[in-house]
Image (cartoon, rainbow, N blue to C red):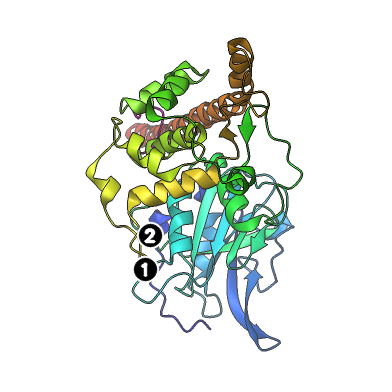
């Protein structure tokens, strides 16, 4: 049995999108080879459940009822190819006071989706909507999976994180790239013309070649200039939080400045997104919110603008314009993905509301039929 005193699970804390799927099992802790192991149990029986056999899964209500049994310690959600969810498991990252270590806090804030405390109390689980990138799925205390695994679900929701499962494909890919993927995974990547990779920029030791005015001019003449202008002027429409908008602007500035931290900070302070939070200390190492946002932006951007075009410094304006268009194709695709993700999220929320309304109407209809029957009697 777990040494931690578990609070009674609050079913209402579990996002409805998870509750509505018949992918629930129970679990109990057993010692195997001297190690505590969470064993999946089929709800309503003493048989072992399988994370690859849907016949051993049940609905949420049935699984929750089984927790009353002495030999059952909790419920679990099984990830499968049939659902759009990815689980992010962060082990040994939470102290007795509930504080997360720097890595876990970074990941939780970037994913910005439903997050809860694990049964041990020392880890956290994040569930997002998205697709797990190719490659390895675990490194150190960070593990990501989307099929043939289950999450123990406690309902012990972490404050200041969303109460719903959010679509976070771009953030998921960034977390995978930074914390899970092999360090040398970019060794064979071919960079777009007119750009330099982070490793090339660091090894060159070159200073930024554009001053602040030139950076703004280039950003405002690029293919995605409307996005830049909106963010620069403090408009956050299309982003689920002010922090997401901050991150988006810093990514754009990181590209045009060659990843120069001081220049990004200087320019951001001139934007309409600037607020007091930028200089607030948010991390145990004394880093401010602004410093960490810049750090994450630089780590997220795969390519940086090269004013020389990566070749002839005397290239004609027409050549430079072509380079700008090619280098911004990646950014345009990312923007399109963000818009699609936002539309999908809003559509999912509308469908949930429609289902809730239909359920209420059905219940009201049954009540009306019963009243009519009683009147006739």
Location of the C terminus by quadrant is top left
Q: CA distance from mark 1 to mark 2?
A: 11 Å
> Mark 1 = which residue?
99
Q: Left or right of 147: which side holds 299?
A: left
Camera-side residue: 369 or 107? 107
Q: Using the rendered view, name the quadrant where residue 327 is placed.
A: top right
**Percent of width and height locating residue 106:** 45, 56
* Residue 165 visible in the snapshot: no
Kindly check if marks 1 and 2 are in contact, taking CB atoms under 8 A apart as contact: no
Residue, far left: 276
**Percent of width and height locating residue 47:** 70, 72
The number of numbered discs placed on residues in the rendered structure image is 2
Say few, some or many: other residues with alpha carbon within 10 Å of mark 1 (under 14 / 14 to 19 / 20 or more): few
Q: Which of marks 2 and 1 precedes in the sequence?
A: 1
Viewer-nearest of labels 1 and 2?
Answer: 1
> Mark 2 = which residue?
158
Q: Is residue 313 rendered magenta in the image?
A: no
- Residue drawn at the location 44% of the way across and 34% of the way down: 253
Magenta extent: 236-241
Mark 2 residue element: loop
Residue, far right: 188
- Residue drawn at the location 63% of the way across and 17% of the way down: 315
Mark 1 residue element: loop
Q: In this picture, is 187 found above or below 371?
A: below
**Percent of width and height locating residue 342:** 48, 30
* Residue 71 visible in the snapshot: yes
Classified by dominant secondary structure, the portion drawn in magenta counts as loop
Q: Is residue 238 rendered magenta in the image?
A: yes
Q: In this picture, is 185 found above or below 56?
A: above
Q: In this picture, is 98 found above or below 169?
A: below
């Amino acid at each position: 049995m777990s040494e931690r005193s578990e609070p009674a699970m609050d079913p209402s804390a579990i996002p409805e999108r998870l509750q509505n799927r018949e992918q629930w099992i129970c679990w109990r802790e057993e010692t195997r080879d001297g190690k505590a192991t969470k064993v999946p149990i089929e709800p309503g029986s003493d048989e072992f459940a399988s994370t690859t056999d849907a016949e051993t899964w049940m609905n949420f209500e049935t699984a929750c009822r089984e927790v009353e049994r002495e030999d059952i310690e909790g419920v679990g959600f099984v990830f499968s190819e049939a659902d759009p969810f990815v689980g992010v498991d962060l082990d040994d990252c939470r102290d007795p006071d509930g504080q997360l270590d720097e890595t876990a806090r970074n990941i939780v804030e970037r994913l910005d989706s439903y997050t809860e405390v694990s049964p041990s109390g020392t880890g956290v689980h994040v569930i997002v909507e998205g697709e797990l990138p190719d490659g390895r799925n675990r490194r150190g205390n960070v593990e990501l999976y989307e099929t043939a695994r289950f999450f123990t679900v406690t309902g012990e929701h972490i404050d200041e994180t969303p109460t719903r499962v959010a679509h976070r494909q771009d953030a998921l890919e960034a977390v995978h790239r930074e914390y899970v993927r092999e360090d040398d995974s970019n060794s064979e990547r071919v960079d777009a013309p007119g750009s330099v990779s982070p490793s090339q920029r660091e090894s060159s030791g070159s200073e930024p070649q554009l001053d602040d005015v030139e950076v703004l001019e280039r950003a405002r003449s690029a293919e995605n200039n409307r996005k830049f202008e909106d963010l620069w002027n403090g408009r956050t429409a299309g982003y689920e939080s002010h922090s997401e908008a901050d991150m988006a602007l810093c990514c754009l500035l990181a590209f045009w400045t060659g990843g120069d931290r001081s220049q990004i900070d200087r320019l951001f302070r001139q934007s309409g997104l600037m607020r007091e939070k930028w200089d607030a200390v948010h991390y145990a190492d004394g880093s401010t919110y602004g410093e960490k946002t810049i750090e994450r932006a630089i780590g997220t951007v795969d390519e940086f603008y090269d004013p020389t075009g990566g070749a002839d410094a005397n290239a004609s304006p027409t050549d430079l314009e072509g380079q700008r268009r090619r280098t911004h194709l990646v950014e345009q695709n990312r923007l399109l993905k963000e818009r699609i993700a936002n539309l999908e999220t809003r559509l999912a929320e509308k469908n949930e509301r429609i289902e809730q309304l239909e359920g209420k109407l059905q219940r009201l209809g049954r009540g009306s039929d019963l009243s009519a029957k009683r009147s006739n009697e």
